[in-house]
Amino acid sequence: KRDSLGPEKDKRLWRNSVYTYLDQILDLPISMITPSAVADVLRPLWTTKNETIDRARSKADQASKYALAKGVTTQANPFDIRTLKYLLPDVSDSEKHHEAIDFVHIPQLYKNTLQALDVSMVNVTATHALQMIMLTALRFSNGAGIRTEWISNKDSSIAITALEMKGRKPSDPDFLVPITAPMNQLIDDRSLFNDLKHSDNKLAGQWLFPQEFRQKDDRQWSHISDNVVRE
């Protein structure tokens, strides 16, 4: 199934989602992955993080259908929502999301993050990622997902590849973000922080805001997740 997912970014996000939320049952024999077992894993987050956990379920659902079509298994799809809905609690369609902050309050929020860092009250990497998003107005995946290789001190810009930008074609030019003075200071702070924390880890060094993810018995690295930043 992995080979049909397209760009490496899509493969990475797909894999991270499945392993983060469904890891408890991925090592089980196929015969033991039943709708009841799947529901037991989904249930703790089904009402509180429904959108996130359902995306993971949907990816596993696709993989299960793919395995069935390829003859890898003859077992009924245990991730099918048409069956799982009888085993999971109802989720209100009127789920409320956090209200977006008025842009006039962004400068004060930025100052608050600086003060929080001064007194060590917060997750440093998550706070730095939030600061970069505020300074650039990028989407979360682009602001928090900045790769160190995109940063050009010579050109004073961050060149985000077209494949990473929503709605862009692979043939489109890189999206250039000018590096302002506050951004430059933040990048310097991140370089120092990453050198102290991850100096011997080349995988973590690919990201300006790295985060470790568990993948079965291995540890993989990607950019920090939106859930960590929200917390």
Image (tube, helix red, strand yellow):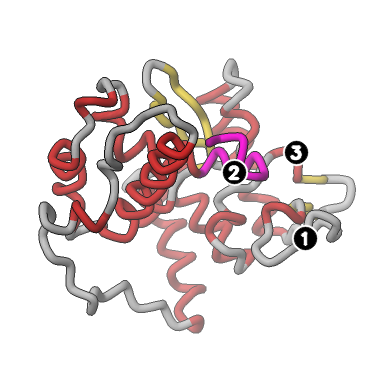
Q: Position of residue 205 (x, y in %)?
A: 62, 29
Question: Residue lying furthest right in this view?
Answer: 154
Amino acid identity at mark 1: Lys
Give the percent coordinates (x, y) of residue 157. Answer: 80, 54
Q: Magenta part mainly helix, strand or loop?
A: helix
Start-end of magenta stretch: 1-13
Q: Which residue is mark 1?
A: 169
Which element type, helix, strand or loop, lies under badge 1?
Answer: loop
Q: Secondary structure at mark 3?
A: helix
Near-viewer residue (194 or 115): 194
Q: Residue at x 43, y 69 (%)?
A: 109
Residue 213 in the image: state x and y as whole percent.
42, 31
Distance between the alpha carbons at the discs numbered 2 and 3: 24 Å
Residue at 63 percent across and 21 percent down: it is 202
Q: CA distance from mark 3 to mark 1?
A: 20 Å
Q: Nearer the viewer, residue 146 or 59?
A: 59
Discs 2/1, front: 2
Q: Is residue 37 magenta?
A: no
Which image quadrant for residue 166?
A: bottom right
Q: 178 above or below 190?
A: below
